[in-house]
Image: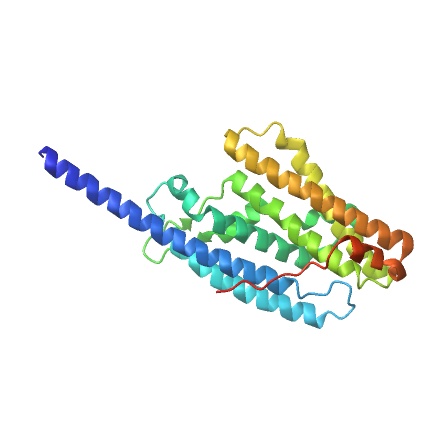
Amino acid sequence: MDVIDQFQLFQQELETKHNKWEKIVKLSRDITIDSKKLIFLLHRIDITSPETNSKFKIITEADEKCDIIMKKWKQIATELQDEDSHAYIRAFSPGLQEFIEAMSFLYYFKTEENYSIQSISNCLLDLSEIQKSLVFADDENKEPLVIPIPVLEYLYGIADTTGEVMRLCINSAAKAITETSKKKVFKLCAFIRILYEMFLSFSSIIDVSPGRKRLLQSKIDVMKSSLQKVEDTCYQLGLRGKELLDVILKNYEPIKVNEPSG
């Protein structure tokens, strides 16, 4: 093979990889949009209400949206077949993080009724559970299609979940009148505190590149800010009760969750 033939072969390989990369990026964007829609849907759940039918309907609808997202993940898994997935991780990283955030938020709603404040850490969606959801049967081969989830991507997604929990907590505090509803708000605060303490415990020892570590630290800083807001909200709720929640509203503007376009 002469030099020209070799370069033509290199060109074909690069074009194939580029086209695969662009296709994965597009699918990742679609997953990001669908995951944001899922999060927006979950914010319609009123945790302070004793009525459960509405929550059940929303969770059922959320599961249906998850099925749509999973079909797109299977498309990505098909593209990554016989490829080094780590070489394409940056192509689908944004979608993966948003997906983990949405799934962990949904998992909290599904499980929080089963645990007290003391055991609320059980509402954290485990990495192994998310990994199981990204294993797909291949119709043509016996080997399943798998999208490996790097630990750091999982941590990024979980860290972002605290922002949604913070929004849920502050918005729910304004409607928490009964002791039961207040406990649900306090449970949200305990969940964020546990996550923050967990991230603090390993942030200084985790071995990643400086750029990735800065990103992790920035997410931890946001978690700290969210925790402070939630603790202040719960302090006002627990100390003064519903009649003085206007103090909270003066300090924090009502947090709106905008429905994503697309």
Q: Is residue 178 left or right of residue 32?
A: right
Classify 193 as above or below 41. above
Would residue 228 be seen by someone viewing this image from the given angle? Answer: yes
Would residue 137 be seen by someone viewing this image from the given angle? Answer: no
**Viewer-side residue, 257 vs 116:** 257
Q: Residue drawn at (65%, 50%), measured in percent from left and top?
A: 163
Q: Residue drawn at (51%, 50%), measured in percent from left and top?
A: 132
Q: How is the image coloured?
A: rainbow
User: What is the quadrant of the N terminus in the image?
Assistant: top left
Q: Residue drawn at (47%, 57%), measured in percent from left and top?
A: 31
**Viewer-side residue, 241 vs 191:** 241
Q: Quadrant of residue 113?
A: bottom right
Q: Is residue 242 left or right of residue 147?
A: right
Q: Position of residue 43 (x, y in %)?
A: 66, 62
Q: Is residue 65 left or right of residue 163?
A: left
Q: Position of residue 193 (x, y in %)?
A: 74, 43
Classify 135 as above or below 218. below
Seen from this angle, which residue lies furthest front?
Answer: 250
Q: Quadrant of residue 180?
A: bottom right
**Viewer-side residue, 162 vs 233:** 233
> How many numbered discs, if any?
0
Q: Residue drawn at (73%, 69%), measured in percent from left and top?
A: 52
Classify 175 as above or below 234. below
Q: Position of residue 200 (x, y in %)?
A: 67, 34
Q: Position of residue 92 (x, y in %)?
A: 44, 48
